[in-house]
Image (spheres, rainbow, N blue to C red):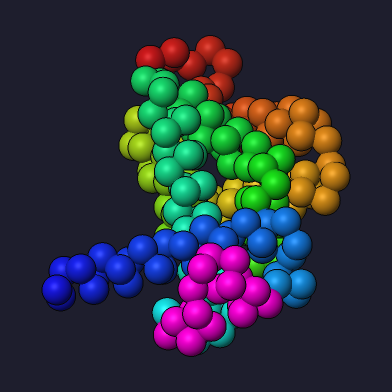
Amino acid sequence: MAVNRAEQRAATRRALLAEGRRRFAADGYHHVVLADVARAAGITKGAAYHHFDSKAGLFRAVVSEVQHELGGRVAAEADRHEDLWEQLRAGCRAFLAAGTDPAVRRILLVDAPTVLGREEWRTLDEESSARHLAEALEALVAAGTLADQPVEPLARLLSGAMNEAALWIARGGDPQAAEQALDRLLAGLRAPARRPPGGSAG
């Protein structure tokens, strides 16, 4: 019986997350009512408040879920390449492309920074896609593709730039123009690692 109850609780939580995600993506945080989410999911209002003490609690859980999915998408795109530099480019492009995904755009890029606050939003980002970026930069520094340097400030600068670009895309910016700018930015990162003219090519 305990196992069945645990399964039922898990199923209830999944149903609330799925319906909440659908409504947050379609209507935006401020137009969603938790009781309506519960009703559409076939769950009582009391059960909804048991799992998530407020609409903000449900939204926070949805944001976390979307953020982790995005991190997985970034990592999967990077893993399609063997070359470390191409891994970085592919992962960054995958992150920017998320700005065109309606659910990611509304939930993660438009509403989350305002509803959760930028500090909490940044923390969630650092636990997923930003972590993959830092790991990629560490590997490139270790391989000598980038000059030996502290990775954290570089990761934060690049992450901030991509977050702003993704937000720009989410608000109607040109994804292709953003991707071209990204390629130019990344190409510039390699410059310090290049040897001066006449030096050894290694």
- Give the x, y percent position of residue 201: 44, 13
Q: Looking at the image, which is closer to me, 187 or 14?
A: 14
Q: For residue 187, what is the image quadrant?
A: top right
Residue 101 magenta: no
- Label the magenta part by its dominant secondary structure: helix
Classify residue 153 as left or right of residue 29. left
Task: Determine the residue positioned at 37% across, 20% down.
Answer: 82
Q: For residue 117, what is the image quadrant?
A: bottom right
Q: For residue 26, what is the image quadrant?
A: bottom right
Q: Is residue 148 visible?
A: no
Q: Looking at the image, which is closer to me, 141 or 155?
A: 155
Find the magenta span and give its range.
Answer: 33-50
Classify residue 45 as left or right of residue 128. right
- Give the x, y percent position of residue 193: 50, 30
Task: Determine the residue positioned at 67% across, 28% down.
Answer: 183
Q: Is residue 103 visible?
A: yes
- Give the x, y percent position of residue 85: 47, 26
- Give the x, y percent position of residue 27: 75, 62
Q: Quadrant of the C terminus?
A: top left
